[in-house]
Amino acid sequence: MPDIARILRNAATSAALLPGLPRSTRGYAATTVMSVSDHAPSAEPRLLLCIDAPSLLHRNHHARAGTDLRDLGGRPAWALHGMVRQVVEAIEAFAPDAVVLGLDDKTSSVRAQAYPAYKAGRAEKDPALVEQLGRAGALLDALGLLTLTPPGLEADDVSASAAAWARRSGWRCVIITSDRDAFAHISDTTEVLRLIDGGIHGSPLLNPARLLALYGVAAEHYLEYAALRGDASDNLPGVTGIGEKGAAALLAQVASMREVWADLEHTGGATIAAALDADAAESGRRRISIGLLNRLRDPSARELYDFNLQIMAGRSDLDLGLTPHVAGTRGLLPLDPDRVRRVVSHLGVEATTQHALRVLSRQSPGA
């Protein structure tokens, strides 16, 4: 269990260490699916596919380590092969106009600087996975795909910036990841394919309506929900006594947590309590207003919530390096078939090489 008191003492200074992390990645409501941006013409908007490469590598390592697949140089390749195969499957399934792959900076972390216990307690990675994680960026670059490793940041920051870029540019965006942090980026222009055991074709594609149905949380509230709940995988404690159900119930009744803190300050929480009690009476659920508001009145609750919000918020202002108006630039398809053949064939699976040529280079079999 992290030292919560120390977290709160450092919360005020953490903002200086995280100057670029916004308090929210979005300030708009999200209610429709794959809708056209206000800035786009009436035709279907173009699609940006953003892939969380480390997420694919981790999942494929754990699923395929038993194969002991090696590349032509004898190095472990099962996670890399699985990643490449899923990248190809995703591009084939979504037919994007541009593709960007986010990677984690393994040399530094602004979040760990603000909170040294960030992600502490995770099991040590298998050396074979670490080795393949280290080779992934070079492999994807060699293919001619667009990758981004933001200094001190993570793949989720690339996802946040991809969602913001799509909205500004009048595009749609699909993020592919197993990380639920990406749910904070769901909107009327961005969906998240949450990778599970079914792979690309068997995983749920979440839009605002599906997120609400599955988790009981509106897309525009997800970051606030996560800050209240905490995240054990990142070693971030939630506000004591709130939990997933309490956070979801609270946010279902308010426009934002700012409204909650303001009501607590000016009315002692009377307005929020009335809304929660009315919902409980209508639904037949037990009343939770007294206990929930008592926990939120604790001064440490606001401080911990604000701290989590700072750590969890994704950077939405990264330069992706996308220039889709310039033919042949990185991020666009098709890719050079000689590069695709050379890079993918080194992984040692001919079927994957042929699949990659067909999808990434749009080359017919046997060409």
Image (cartoon, helix red, strand yellow):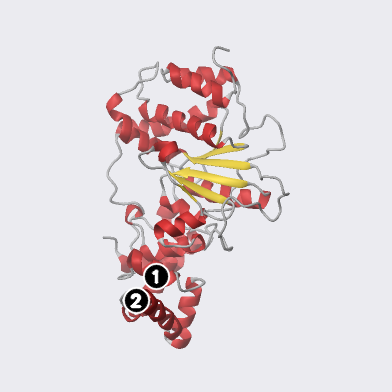
Mark 2 or mark 1, earlier in chain? 1
Q: Is residue 298 visible?
A: no
Give the quarter of the figure containing the N terminus: bottom left
Residue 307: assigned label: none
- Amino acid under label 2? Leu
- Determine the secondary structure under disc 1: helix
Give the quarter of the figure containing the C terminus: top right
Which of label 2 and label 1 is nearer to you?
1
For the point 43% across and 58% down, the residue is 213
Q: Give the residue at mark 2.
A: 292
Q: Give the residue at mark 1.
A: 249
* Position of residue 177 measured from the top left corner of the image (x, y, whole percent): 44, 44
Residue 122, placed above or below residue 20: above
- Amino acid under label 1? Ala
Displayed quadrant of residue 86: top left
88 or 281: which is nearer to us?
Answer: 281
For the point 32% across and 34% down, the residue is 63
For the point 59% across and 37% down, the residue is 96
363 or 81: which is nearer to us?
Answer: 363
- Determine the secondary structure under disc 2: helix
Mark 2 to mark 1 CA distance (whole Å)? 10 Å
